[in-house]
Structure formats: C-alpha cells, structure tokens
Image (tube, grey):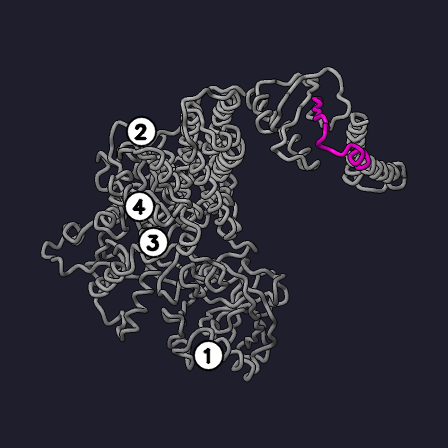
Amino acid sequence: MIPAQFEAKQAEKKWYDYWMEHKYFHSTPDHRTPYTIVIPPPNVTGVLHMGHMLNNTIQDVLIRRARLKGFNACWVPGTDHASIATEAKVVAKLKSEGINKSDLTREEFLKHAFDWTEKYGGTILEQLKQLGCSCDWDRTKFTMDDDMSASVIKSFVDLYNKGLIYRGYRMVNWDPEAKTTLSDEEVIYEERQGKLYHLKYQIEGSEEFVTIATTRPETILGDTAICIHPEDERYFHLKGKKAIVPICNRVIPIIFDEYVDMEFGTGCLKVTPAHDVNDKTLGDKHGLEIIDIFNEDATLNSFGLHYEGQDRFEVRNAIEKELESIGALSKVENHVNNVGTSERTKAVIEPRLSDQWFLKMDELVKPAIKAVLESDEIKLHPSRFNNTYAHWLNNIRDWNISRQLWWGQQIPAYYYGDGKEDFVVAENIEDALVLAKEKTSNANLKAVDLRQDPDALDTWFSSWLWPISVFGGMMDPDNKEFKYYYPTNDLVTGPDILFFWVARMIIAGYEYTGEKPFSNVYLTGLVRDKQGRKMSKSLGNSPEPLGLIEKFGADGVRVGLLLSSSAGNDILFDEELCNQGKGFANKIWNAFRLIKGWEVADITQPTSSKAAIEWYEAKLQKVLVEIEDNFEKYRISDALMAIYKLVWDDFCSWFLEIIKPGYQQPIDRTTFNKAIEMLEANLKLLHPFMPFLTEEIWQYIAKRTPEEALIIASWPEIKPFDEKIIADFDFATEVISGIRTIRKDKNIAFKEAIELKVMNNEKASTHFDSIIMKLGNIVDLTYVTEKVNGALSYRVKSNEYFIPVGGNVDLDAEIAKLNEELNYIKGFLRSVQGKLANEKFVNGAPEQVIANERKKEADALAKIATLEQSLASLQ
C-alpha cells in the first residue's frame, strides 16, 4: 500500500541507512573519470547552522548529479581543529574545574583537548547525514590526525629549507583574550564610537607646552619621542629640545621627520614604538627606545606604574581623570575609531612586538594570481569575486604562521642554545639532533638538550593543504589515490574565507604539485533573515536547522534553501520557502499516487495521449538542455527552478491532466508505461535536490535490486528534439485557456460539451486538436472560413475561436454586459487620449510616464476591437 502522504522522517532514516549499507557513497579509484569535492572542514566542535545547510546542500547536489552522470564521485568529509576557538573552550572548561592551563604540561593539556574533541567533536558530521549529505564517510579526516599533522610539519620544513619561512621580531596583531598572534586576515575592523584626547606635553626647561591628540591616552606611558615635520615653521624653535611625558615624567627627545602630516591636528605626533606599527618604523629610523607597557592579557605591566595589573580600558578611564587633575588634558572630543577586533574571540586587537614565524608570500603568490586572473585555469563563480581576489593577492604581506597556543601542530624548530638563531628545523627530534650536532660541531649533544618551539602553527597553515593531504599527497605524492583524485573538481565555500582558505589552497597546490587544487570555486552568499539581517543568536533570528528538517523534511529544507540562493548573493531566508519545498514534495507524491491509482488495460491508446507523450518527451529534452547549461554556469538555483516548473507545470498540470482516463475508466498500457517512464526521468533530475522523496517513489514504482537504486541510476541522456512541437503545444494551451475562461465567465459547467469553430488565420498546427477537445470538453471542433454569428469568441494571436451560444447563455444579458464593458473602456480611452492631446502634459511629463499612457491607449483600442467583434458575432 502506498501511504496517503509522504512520510519524510521515516523515508529519511530508511534510505540513508540503505545507502550506507550498500556503500553507494564510497569511492575507490577505477576505470571511470573521477569527480571530487573536498568539504570545507567545519570546526570539530561546531554544530550545524544555516550557512552549513546551504553550503553542504549545494555540494550534495553536485556530487549526486556527478554520480548519476557516471563519474566516480568522491566527496571527502572532515573537520578542522580550529586552534583558537577550541583551545579557548578547553581552557574555559578546565577553569570551571579549578584547573589553570599554566599548571599543566603541554602533554596534559593536549590530552584534555583531545578528550574534549572526542566528546563534542564530529556532531556536525552526524547532523549533515540528516540533511542527506552523501559524503564518503570512510574517508573522514581531522586536521589533527597523525598523517594530516605529518603533512603540515613536512610542509613547514620544506618551506624553511627553501628559505621561505623565517623568524622575525615584528609588530603583530595580538589577541589578548586568546593570548596569541593573528594574521592580518583574522582581524575584523569595526567602526566604534570613542574619544580623542588632547594632551599637553611640557617642553623641558620652560613653561611651554605642545598639544598632541590621541585615542589611546594609556599608551603615553610607553612614549619615547615627539615627532614634528622638519618644515613646520611653528616648531622650528623646538629643534634639539626635549619634552616631558605627563604622569611618568619621562624626558623624551623631539625628533623631526617628514612622516608627520603638518595639516593634521596640531602637527605633533607622540611616538610609541612598542604599540603602533608606524611608530615602530619611526623608532627604528631614529634609534628610539622601545617600552612595552602591556602584559599578554592587555593589563599594564610595571611600566604602567601605579596602573600595573589593571586592564587597558579601565586604565583609559582612570588616566583621563588623572591627566585632567594635573592639568595635562586640554580637551576631549567624541571620535569614531576604526577598531581591529579578533575574528574568533571578538577582543580588541593590540599591536605588539613579538618574535614570530613568517612565510614569505611575494613569490609563492604568483602562480595563484596567474591561475585565476590570467589563464582562467581556476574559475570563481560568480566572477565578480575576481576583483576581490586580485586586490588581496596583489597586496599580500608575509603570513604570520605562528600562534601562542598548544592546540595545533607544534612548530618543528628545535633550540639548542639561548640565542634567537640557535635552532634547527626538522620533521622530528631525531633529525633535529643530527642537524644540531652538525651546526654546533658538538657530537655530544643529546635529544634532552634540545627544546622544541612551544608555539603552534596557524590553523590555516594546516587546512591550506586540505585537498592534497586528505589523499596523502604530501607524504606520498606518487600514491594511487592522490594521482587519481587530485586535482579535485569543484569547491563550494563562502566568500568570507576566499583569502583565509581558498587562495592559500591555490598557492599550496601550485607550490607542492605544480597543479591547481580544483577547477571551479562556487561562492555561496550569506544566509540572512527576511529583513536582510545577518543571522545571530543575539537577534534570535537564526532557526535551528534540525528543527527545520523535523518540520518540513530534509528535501523541503533543501529545496527551500536552493530556490532562494544564487551564487555569491545573500539569501533572504524565510521558513515559508521550506514550506514551499514541502509543498513541492507533496505535489510530486500525489502525482505518483495518481498514476499508480489508475487501472491499466490493453486498450487502444487515445490520440490525445499519444500527442501528449510526444510533446512531453520534447519538453523534457528542452529543459534538460537548460539544466545542463545552468549547471555548467553554476546557476544551481536556476537549474532547480527549471526542474520545478517542468514537474509542477508541465508534468502535473498538463501531461497528467491530458492522459488521465475518464471517471472509473482504465488507462491504456502504452500510455501508462510512458507515464512511468516520464516520471522516472523526472525523479532522476530531482534526485540531487530531493534525494529521499525520489528514492522512496523510485522504489515504490517497481521492485528494485541494490544495483537498480535511484542513487546510482543514469542521468537522462540529451537527444535531439523538435522545437516546433513545443511551440505548437504552447499555442494549444492558450486555446484551452481561452475555452476555460469563457466557461468560467459564462458559468458553463465543464460537464456540458460544447462546440468550437476555428478561423485558422494563423495557419496553426492541428496536431494537438485532440488535446484541445479533451481538456475543453469539445464535442465538435471544425474549421470555418467566416465569422460565426451568435457565438462567444476570443483570439489567440490572429486565430479566432467561436463557441456557439446555444442554450448555454442568456443572449440578451450577454449583449448588455458586453455593451456596458465597451462603454466603460471607451470612456477610459477618452481620458487617456485627452492627456496625450495636452501639449503641456506631453512636454513636461517624464518619458516613461508618456510611454505608459501610450500603452494604455493601445491596450484600450485592442480591447474595444475585441468587444465590438464579440458583440457583432452575438447580434
């Protein structure tokens, strides 16, 4: 028995288990052409959100379609260790248990971190299964797996040996909450309301002051100079003089440099080399002292004097009052600042001088620029992101790849002495010991004499190898799998990680394999609510994804998301879209039940059914060409919409209506078999988008072996088709619509058979007359050469159609109704023509307004002609 309704929840579990049992998702190298996607690895402790739902639905559509098209489809899943985010969670958990990270050894902390990821990790991958994602779960990777970590270490050593990785004392972006550096790309700039403080610095040995504006008064405790432009006449007399820093009373030199903008503020600049990248450059140039006033958590250290131990923002408020009390504060103004914040912790970034590891990017980046912007070897969809990509790569800076964390791959640098350069780089301590002995000429060195750099590598330094390392390409580049699956085909991700991940994978791909890592990058938009707001927990506007699946079914949610999503454009998500997807699933289910409910008999096939099959086969082919074109251009939403219209409008509303047998009558076997064949073709097209519903119907249609499951069926083959058949049918549907309109307007019941007379001025095809007769309940369709009097009429293009009135219509009432409508339209026409005859209106109104009025005139004239013709035929 076929259930009255599609039971989504039951079908989802049944068919996912069935697919897993028969290993349809698993791929191994064979004779077929591979089609490969690697998942953008979500945070190991993450949970499914709307962005994941969209991104992974698109990937699943691509992979399921590739499977149907006969490719060896391989979708590699996995998770990222997310060093900053995960370490912060582990530290917070330990703190709640009364344990400080600083009291643990690295090994003890890592055990806690692995326990944490084992307990909370992988949840998101299980949730993706509920969405229907057909990943090769046997290949699941984690960026901290032993082989993945080994790939990262090998990469570091290789790049160091090539002279591309170096250690440098630089101004970096410091996250005081995570207590680690960040790369430039991990800093998000936000406009915030702040203050501009005008501070007075006394000139040593005089009563004179210079005023300097700053947004950060707490940093005066690290000031080591005042800088003035050498051509600023206002301050010529200060050359060779010194100034006194308020509060700490440090005497600092007044230096002169063209870096200062004479027109900005007072023309005087405070120089704090430890806390501003530009000040550091000035300090190096003029040999200034460097005074760092902050601890790693952005509290003040001993150079902060009586503010030692206090947070920087608390000090900012307190120091304002102290400066005012000693007369060193001239004024305070409101000021909008562009403040750098940590992408992960949201903490305000502190510029900080630190010994860090950097990767030189200027040469590495060149193949990646060429691949996307010159050779078109890699295509971004939509292509407008090429400009964003170009801007970043053409202005790239060396990548700070070290993080002051323990959770992640530990930097493979081993120190054998106390000097900054007393280190060697190797994949393991055994190799490091050999190198250290060579470098020091000390054969007595032992492994215990070496100390590994405590820092971990940036998470992105791990994931930039993802398409290579998931197939073992770093450790064994000649292995069978890597040679078969790499380069991958398509990457689906968000534009927010175009720099962090996509560009870097391209760079790594060319550096390590000499090849692109993928051919196409489909950049999805951001999922917003229907008011256009970014979804967030604080706004309460982000629906729970699994709740949506529970309510609308996975297929309904997938359709709802994709109907509203075009590449690179933000999606205004509304639950009603998922409801629409659910409604579409019900429509398909009911169409299937309708067909299976017909009694089949060995009787003659009606002409109308034969014509309908001929038309639908042509229409299916035309839509198939459209779908292929949309997929080729990565217009996934458009591809779905083309299928949606084919199934809803053409198959359900027209095809099934035409072939439907009369009440309590059987359908002929030829037509029934064709209806099943067309339904199966539709299911194949729908399967990538609605996998559960389509497999359920497919398996109900006939008893299938595992080798005959829909998931591994064949995508419909494109064949030649006749465009004229489709055009002729479209014409016939207009004729049928005209009949239906007259029946509705004149209250002529469908069960009443009527006649139809046709003046075929258009020389339209008569091929679909049998369908017109069936759907219009026409008892007699004849072609005439003259207008038919006493008949209701309408036009389709230049053809005229007449329905003799007979006893169906009150003739006098119909004539009166037509006259009333005619008089109204004539009155409307006079008012429009009056406007157009008014020179002042025509000369003064915008061009579009005039065009609208002329269209109204043309429409009214056409309507009057039709009404007069109808009246003439009735009189």
Q: Residues within 10 Å of mark 2 (few under 14, many from 20)?
A: few
Circle number at residue 14: 4
Which is nearer the eye, 261 or 151?
Answer: 151
Report the magenta residues as a range.
798-817
Q: Is residue 145 above or below residue 205?
A: above
Helix, strand, or loop for circle 1?
Answer: loop
Callout 4 amino acid: Lys
Q: In front of the other: label 2 or label 4?
A: 4
Which mark sits nearer the N-terminus, 4 or 3? Answer: 4
Q: In front of the other: label 2 or label 1?
A: 2
- Pinpoint residue 73: horizontal percent, then vertical percent: 32, 35
Disc 4 from disc 1: Cα separation? 74 Å
Callout 2 amino acid: Thr
Q: Which residue is mark 1?
A: 248
Circle number at residue 854: none
- Pinpoint residue 741: horizontal percent, then vertical percent: 67, 34
Which mark sits nearer the N-terminus, 2 or 1? Answer: 2
Disc 4 from disc 3: Cα separation? 21 Å
Q: In front of the other: label 4 or label 3?
A: 4
* The furthest residue to the bottom: 325
Quadrant of residue 135 within the rendered picture: top left
Q: In front of the other: label 1 or label 3?
A: 3
- Residue 578 falls left or right of residue 14: right
Callout 1 amino acid: Cys
Which is nearer the eye, 298 or 566?
Answer: 566
Q: Residue at x 50, y 53 (%)?
A: 575
Q: Which residue is mark 2?
A: 33
Disc 1 from disc 3: Cα separation? 54 Å
Q: Which residue is mark 3?
A: 124
